[in-house]
Image (spheres, rainbow, N blue to C red):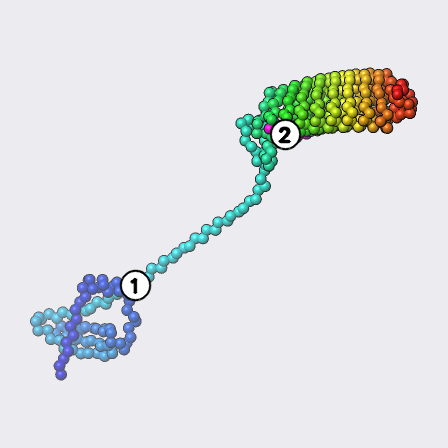
Amino acid sequence: MKQKLYTFYPLSPEELKALSQKPPPPKPRLWGTAVLCLIIVGSVAGGTALARGGNNEPIQTNATMTATATTTTTTAAPVQTTTTTTITTTTTTTTTTTSQTTTTTAAPKVVPVSDSDFMIEKNGYDYVLTKYNGAGGDVVIPDSVTSIGDFAFDACESLTSITIPDSVTSIGNWAFHGCTSLTSITIPDRVTSIGNGTFSLCTSLTSIAIPESVTSIGDWAFNGCTSLTSITIPDSVTSIGESAFSYCTSLTSIAIPESVTSIGNDAFRGCTSLTSITIPESVTSIGYWAFADCKSLTSITIPDSVTSIGNYAFYGCTSLTSITIPESVTSIGEYAFYWCYKLTIKCTEGSAGNKYAEANGIKYKLIK
């Protein structure tokens, strides 16, 4: 029988390195033929090598060492394969952005001007001067302004003069109220009305020109302008409000145009320097206290258009000596001529004037 010889070679470092880099082999099967587990046993005299085959059966071989008296036993070292598993952990950071929307009601747009003394607000196409915060003196309103708001210069006692641009079409209520140092003012031609109390208590105002564009003079418009000596009311004005010129104690005369249809209550009350007044044919009524306490008024003629004279209309006119009351007047209010000690009423017989004079013990003179 022919014997088989099995020769075993040691692995080089390169082969060991290559094997260490390969993936681990599958678990060995005891009955498989792919892997040989060899056990080599050397003997000093003449060894016997045992090997186990794939079926785990021992194989006996006789190896005769003839070249040397020394027996060398070589044992194949087991190869250890290390498998390194790298676990990569990915951390995902989620950033949540919260968007908060705040709804804010828009304030009126403030139009910047070169002089910070003025507060100007835009209202549609209108630029309203709402407040003056300056030191006073001679003030020029910016050309961008189209209207002067209510109380804009209220109680500005250091204001001496003011220039209003032609762009202004309206002047608000009490706009210059209490400007005690204001001496003169020119109202531009585009202004159509003078509001309530606009120049009230402007005690240093001596004169004012009202343009033809103005159609109405509001209540208390010039109330208490104690230095105002004269004023011209244009033909465009149709109404004079209550107390419009009340207590203008330096006003000596005034001409009311034909366009005016009514004179409001207290319109000229307390005008103690007023000596004469002409009431036009257009006026139909004279309000309560309209000329009360006009202590310098000496005479007045009431036109045929007037139908009523209000209560206290000429109360306390202590210098009034003569008044003509036409037949058109059908009603005369209580105390209309009370405290008019020097008065003689000129009237037609049987008229309201005649009856009033007789009822109140006032002298009268009948006219035809």
Secondary element under disc 2, as helix, strand or loop, is loop
Q: Which one is nearer the viewer's eye here, 365 or 23?
A: 365
The quarter holding residue 267 reads top right
x then y, percent, for residue 123? 60, 35
Residue indicated by mark 1: 83
Secondary element under disc 1, as helix, strand or loop, is loop
Crowding near the residue tagged with mark 1, few <14, some 14–19, many ≥20 C-alpha atoms within 10 Å: few
Q: Is residue 300 left or right of residue 199?
A: right
Q: Is residue 291 magenta?
A: no
Residue 318 visible? The answer is: no
Crowding near the residue tagged with mark 2, few <14, some 14–19, many ≥20 C-alpha atoms within 10 Å: many
Q: Is residue 210 left or right of residue 301?
A: left
Q: Residue furthest front?
A: 368
Q: Which residues are magenta?
A: 167-173
Label annotation for residue 235: none
Image quarter (top left, top right, bottom left or bottom right) of the C terminus:
top right
x then y, percent, for residue 94? 45, 53
Q: Is residue 340 left or right of residue 171?
A: right
Task: Tell me which residue sits at (71%, 17%) in the image.
Answer: 229
The quarter holding residue 71 reads bottom left
The amino acid marked with disc number 1 is: Thr
Task: Tell me which residue sits at (26%, 65%) in the image.
Answer: 22
The amino acid marked with disc number 2 is: Thr
Name above or below for residue 42 compared with residue 192. below
Label annotation for residue 169: 2
- Classified by dominant secondary structure, the portion drawn in magenta counts as loop
Residue 190 visible? The answer is: yes
Measured in 3D between alpha carbons, the distance from the residue under mark 2 to the one under mark 1, in whole angstroms, is: 96 Å
Image quarter (top left, top right, bottom left or bottom right) of the N terminus:
bottom left
